[in-house]
Image (cartoon, rainbow, N blue to C red):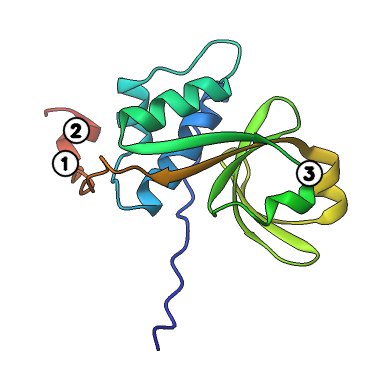
Amino acid sequence: MDMFIKRVKLILQSEDSECGQACLAMIFNYYGYGISLPELRKNHSAQTGGTKVSYLMETCNDHGFSAIAYSLTIEELRKLTFPCILHWNFSHFVVLTKINKNIVEINDPALGCMRVDQDKLKQYFTGVAVEIKKSESFSPVKPKKINIRDVTGRV
């Protein structure tokens, strides 16, 4: 029996307006589509004034994923495929990775990995979630290797 549980690797945002992009990068990498946040930023610039759910869905389609946005209750969250994206505190996106009876685990691209109780979930979850799955056109992509010269420049 395989005891390996695949985890969603945390990707932190580096700009205030790219929480949606960071969430997409986390989920894309989870499914084997190796893309970095800078690559995603280069191909899909962050929206001024905050990311819209429609932007998340369009970006998913561009990379071989299907995305469905839902308006739902906390109880209905359990029916979704994890990981998924939650709209959080009316101005932010987080990745929901696990939900138990009393605790949910989220990857917050601004704050890191967190365990949140039901009261905090009720306080911050706006009722909007985006479920992301591989589409029929999905093709895995190996992550690009980072060359030290790409980071430091040519010396």
Badge nearest the viewer, 3 or 1: 3
Amino acid beneath label 1: Asn
Q: Which residue is mark 1?
A: 147
Helix, strand or loop status at disc 1: loop
User: Where's the N terminus, which quadrant?
Assistant: bottom left
Query: Does the CB distance between marks 2 and 1 fall below 8 Å?
Result: yes
Left or right: residue 46 versus residue 93 is left
Badge nearest the viewer, 2 or 3: 3
Q: Residue furthest top?
A: 48
User: Where's the C terminus, which quadrant?
Assistant: top left
The 10 Å Cα crowd at callout 3, few under 14, some 14 to 19, many 20 or more, is some
Helix, strand or loop status at disc 2: helix
Q: Residue furthest front?
A: 136
Q: CA distance from mark 3 to mark 1?
A: 45 Å
Instruction: Note whether 111 is above or below 38 in the view shown.
Output: below
Helix, strand or loop status at disc 3: loop
Q: Which residue is mark 3?
A: 73
Q: Which residue is mark 2?
A: 150
Measuring 50% from the left and 41% from the top, which residue is drawn there?
12
Q: Position of residue 79 (x, y in %)?
A: 64, 55
Q: Position of residue 55 (x, y in %)?
A: 48, 21
Q: Quadrant of residue 94?
A: top right
Q: Position of residue 127 (x, y in %)?
A: 75, 36
Q: CA distance from mark 2 to mark 3?
A: 45 Å
Measuring 37% from the left and 39% from the top, which residue is drawn there?
65
Total count of labels: 3
